[in-house]
Amino acid sequence: MGSSQLHYYTTEVEFMGQKVKNVLKGVSVGGDYISGNTIINNYYGSQAEAGTEKSKDDKTIFLSYNWHDGETADRIDRHLSGLPGVTIKRDVRDIGAWKSIRKFMEGIRQQDYAVLIVSDSYLKSKNCMFEATEMMKEREYADRIFPAVVEKGIYDPLVRAGYISYWQQKCDELEAAVRGLDPANAVELAADLKRYKNIASSVSEFLSIVADRNNPDIQEVEIQIEKAVLKN
């Protein structure tokens, strides 16, 4: 992501007969300067003012993907980040060091839309499917998701059955492991098992909804997402 340099600038002004010192702290990345309350998203060059209230016409989009599909995520991110009034929420820049990954993932429900890059890796990832099931808790969530389908096998019911079986097996494996532990020592694992079971019980509905869509070709999906977002 390039090198970063931290600059400090100190100025003094006189206000109401008293001197007030103002320290501006900025980060220079790739030649862009940040100072005061201005925050520049150098990942793809979009800019937002800290403390500026979101306009009712502004949109936030959560990008849900597996890192194996990073190139596709980059392409979609780059395109949508250039749209006026659109902010893309993405793990690589929105999860701070030592911050909670789960809290970030739960934030998918607070965004206007979610782009889900549905690949084989996505459908077998507990983090990706956790994000999908979190979104499914929202009313009329089907109208707020844009599936970007990489794994075209999901249109085949036999393939969908395979993913359902995969998560049932994962639940059985974890449940057997937890059963052999003292309950007092397995509280967090029990919470993980609950999340696994939620994925297993939701994956069939999720796949059916995605497979029922007239999903755009993955090579031009960002163009269709742009049209849908700006239309709304």
Image (tube, helix red, strand yellow):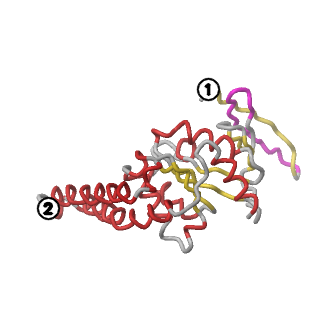
For the N terminus, give its image quadrant: top right
Q: Position of residue 202 (x, y in %)?
A: 39, 66
Disc number lying in front (2 or 1): 2
Graded by Cα atoms within 10 Å as few (under 14), some (14 to 19) or many (20 or more), the crowding at tag 2 reads few
Q: Residue at x 48, y 51 (%)?
A: 118
**Identity of the residue drawn at 58% across and 64% down:** 110
Q: Could you say where residue 232 lies in the image, as x and y percent from the top left?
A: 73, 64
For badge 1, the amino acid type reads: Gly
Mark 1, Cα crowd under 10 Å, few <14 / some 14-19 / many 20+, is: few
Residue 2's disc number? 1
Query: 54 or 206, which is in the foreground?
Result: 206
- Point out the stretch of residues depicted in magenta: 17-33
Which residue carries the number 2 mark? 179
Which of 29/228 is in front?
A: 228
In-image side of 223 versus 219 (left or right) = right
Q: Nearer the N terminus, badge 2 or badge 1?
A: 1
Q: Amino acid at mark 2?
A: Arg
Q: For residue 205, what is the image quadrant?
A: bottom left
**Looking at the picture, how far across and down is residue 169, in whole percent?**
24, 56
Q: Secondary structure at mark 2?
A: helix
State how far apart marks 2 and 1 are (Cα).
48 Å
- Asked if the magenta segment contains residue 21, the reply would be yes
Q: Position of residue 143 (x, y in %)?
A: 60, 67
Q: Residue furthest bottom?
A: 139
| Whether residue 41 is situated above or below residue 133 in the rendered picture | above
- Element on which disc 1 rests: loop
